[in-house]
């Protein structure tokens, strides 16, 4: 072969290589755009991950498939612990395969954790599942909405709900983790965004590097859905679902309709949970933290329902959301009433009358349309929905429970709620006495002041009552003589706001 022919063939080869490169670039771009595969290199990956994804080349997919088949067999056999190592290998071979991260995290959080009786052991596996998605899965798959959805669901369902008998322990552990960053119920987001002191820089660093949360996004989500109690897990559920929706806006070609539905539903359910128990308060009896309702987010929760109704298309979906909205509003009215926010309760009562004029307010009562009953009647009926009007012992127990909660709220400085509970106890007492009047003294309750005195005596009991500092605070709030603890029983006055 002469030199000219060789040169010509070499030139043709160069042209073909150049053409193949151009075509390969376009094919890779299309593969990335349509989510067929991931060809961009991993950033900040551990050495073992970088090695497997480069050195094994295309063979790593074949190996991962074989491991995945074996992992599925182990799952069918309930051998979850054995699955952990296989899933770890699969994520190292295919770190851009989001389903593996989701399955492995779910396995740790749900399947393995319940194998342990000790709550600390359970929490260790639950939190490993959260860390796996948060610290690794999302890091290597930052545009995969399903990972945001799964992480948000862990916070809402596993930590936020009460289906696991260790749920209260989970909440306590998460609150302690968040308290490293959030010191007050209302965090200073600007301080975390642009810290000016060493202490603020430390907290901001923990938030960004350890918890993988952006204070800018926290501030945005709090403004839109809050005010939120960030030490509770439902606030984190809202954060990750909200971040997922932001990702969907920036990468619309990667959006699946079902992912958007799930993300919005998590926000809506988390907000409802935040309304019901979105505040942390200290139990005066044990000193441990309890939950209280967050009434300040009621308008935003209702707005979320309205948005959800407008976003769905089918009538059946709209009906389900509207029914959930009505149930939420019934609770909101009652909670506002109990907290002595009567004017707000009345406004939402009118709102329900306009939005749901043909739906009864009281379950099982066909004569309880919003136009047929008053706010006071509705509030008392809410308590009596599960008791009979003539159930003497149960009504007595509920009245004394309301009075006890009223005293405890006085200790906590929640004077409006204390007054609201006291008013509700009086109304329930009056309604019951009126209902049983024809039956005479046989079924009537003791005098109201005697019930109140009995509750107070129980709280101030030297051996079984409140903690000493809380006893002193209650005595001060009620304006009782300081020596009442050594001179029981004594008459008390009606609790009043200060």
Image (cartoon, rainbow, N blue to C red):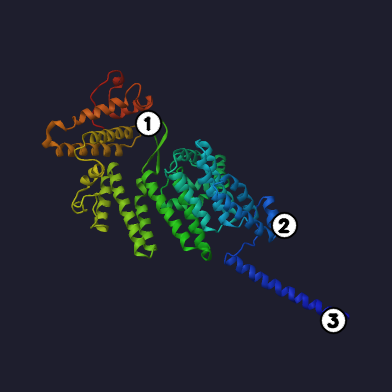
Residue at 81% across, 76% down: 10
Nearest to N terminus: mark 3 or mark 2 = 3
CB of mark 3 within 8 Å of CB of mark 2?
no
- Distance between the alpha carbons at the discs numbered 1 and 2: 61 Å
| Comparing labels 1 and 2, the label whose residue is closer to the camera | 2
Residue 328 rendering spot, x and y as whole percentages: 32, 51
Picture quarter with the C terminus: top left
Residue bearing mark 3 = 5
Residue bearing mark 2 = 55
Q: Is residue 194 visible from the viewing direction of this image?
A: no
Residue bearing mark 1 = 284
Element under disc 1: loop
Residue 221 rendering spot, x and y as whole percentages: 45, 52
For the residue carrying disc 2, how many other residues have a C-alpha within 10 Å: few (<14), some (14-19), or many (20+)?
A: few
Nearest to N terminus: mark 1 or mark 2 = 2
Residue 339 rendering spot, x and y as whole percentages: 30, 41
Identify whether 59 is placed above or below 104. below
Residue at 52% across, 46% down: 111
Most extreme residue toward the right is: 2
Nearest to N terminus: mark 3 or mark 1 = 3
């Amino acid at each position: 072969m002469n030199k000219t022919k060789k040169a010509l063939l070499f030139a043709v080869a160069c042209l073909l290589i150049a053409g193949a490169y151009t075509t390969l670039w376009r094919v890779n771009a299309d593969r990335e755009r349509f989510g067929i595969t991931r060809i961009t290199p991993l950033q900040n990956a551990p050495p073992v991950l970088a090695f497997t994804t480069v050195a094994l080349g295309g063979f790593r997919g074949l190996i991962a498939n074989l491991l995945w088949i074996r992992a599925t067999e182990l799952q069918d056999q309930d051998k979850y612990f054995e699955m952990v190592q296989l899933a770890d290998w699969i994520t190292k071979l295919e770190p851009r395969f989001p389903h593996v991260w989701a399955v492995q995290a779910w396995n740790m959080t749900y399947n393995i954790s319940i194998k342990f009786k000790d709550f600390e052991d359970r929490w260790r596996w639950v939190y490993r599942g959260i860390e796996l998605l948060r610290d690794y899965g999302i890091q290597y798959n930052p545009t995969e909405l399903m990972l945001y959805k799964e992480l948000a669901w862990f916070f809402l369902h596993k930590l936020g709900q009460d289906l696991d008998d260790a749920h209260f322990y989970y909440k306590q552990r998460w609150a302690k983790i968040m308290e490293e960053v959030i010191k007050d119920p209302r965090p200073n987001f600007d301080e975390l965004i642009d810290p000016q002191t060493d202490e603020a820089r430390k907290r901001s660093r923990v938030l960004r590097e350890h918890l993988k949360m952006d204070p800018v996004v926290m501030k945005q989500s709090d403004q839109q859905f809050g005010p939120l109690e960030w030490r509770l897990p439902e606030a984190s559920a809202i954060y990750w679902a909200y971040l997922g929706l932001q990702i969907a806006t920036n990468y619309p070609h990667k959006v699946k309709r079902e992912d958007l539905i799930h993300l919005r539903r998590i926000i809506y359910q988390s907000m409802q949970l935040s309304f019901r128990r979105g505040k942390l308060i200290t139990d005066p009896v044990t000193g441990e933290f309890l939950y209280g309702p967050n009434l300040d987010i009621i308008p935003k929760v209702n707005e979320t329902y309205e948005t959800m109704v407008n976003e769905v298309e089918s009538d059946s979906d709209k009906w389900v959301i509207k029914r959930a909205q009505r149930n939420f509003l019934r609770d909101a009215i009652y909670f506002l009433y109990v907290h002595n926010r009567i004017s707000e309760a009345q406004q939402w009562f009118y709102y329900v009358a306009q939005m749901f004029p043909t739906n009864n307010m009281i379950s099982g009562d066909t004569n309880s349309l919003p136009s047929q009953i008053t706010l006071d009647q509705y509030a008392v009926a809410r308590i009596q929905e599960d008791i009979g009007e003539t159930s003497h012992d149960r009504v007595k127990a509920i009245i004394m429970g309301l009075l006890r909660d009223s005293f405890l709220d006085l200790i906590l400085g929640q004077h409006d709620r204390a007054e609201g509970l006291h008013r509700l106890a009086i109304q329930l007492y009056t309604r019951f006495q009126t209902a049983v009047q024809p039956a005479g003294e046989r079924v009537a309750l003791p005098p109201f002041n005697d019930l109140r005195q009995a509750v107070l005596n129980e709280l101030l009991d030297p051996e079984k009552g409140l903690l000493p500092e809380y006893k002193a605070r209650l005595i001060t709030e009620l304006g009782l003589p300081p020596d009442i603890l050594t001179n029981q029983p004594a008459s008390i006055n009606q609790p009043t706001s200060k």
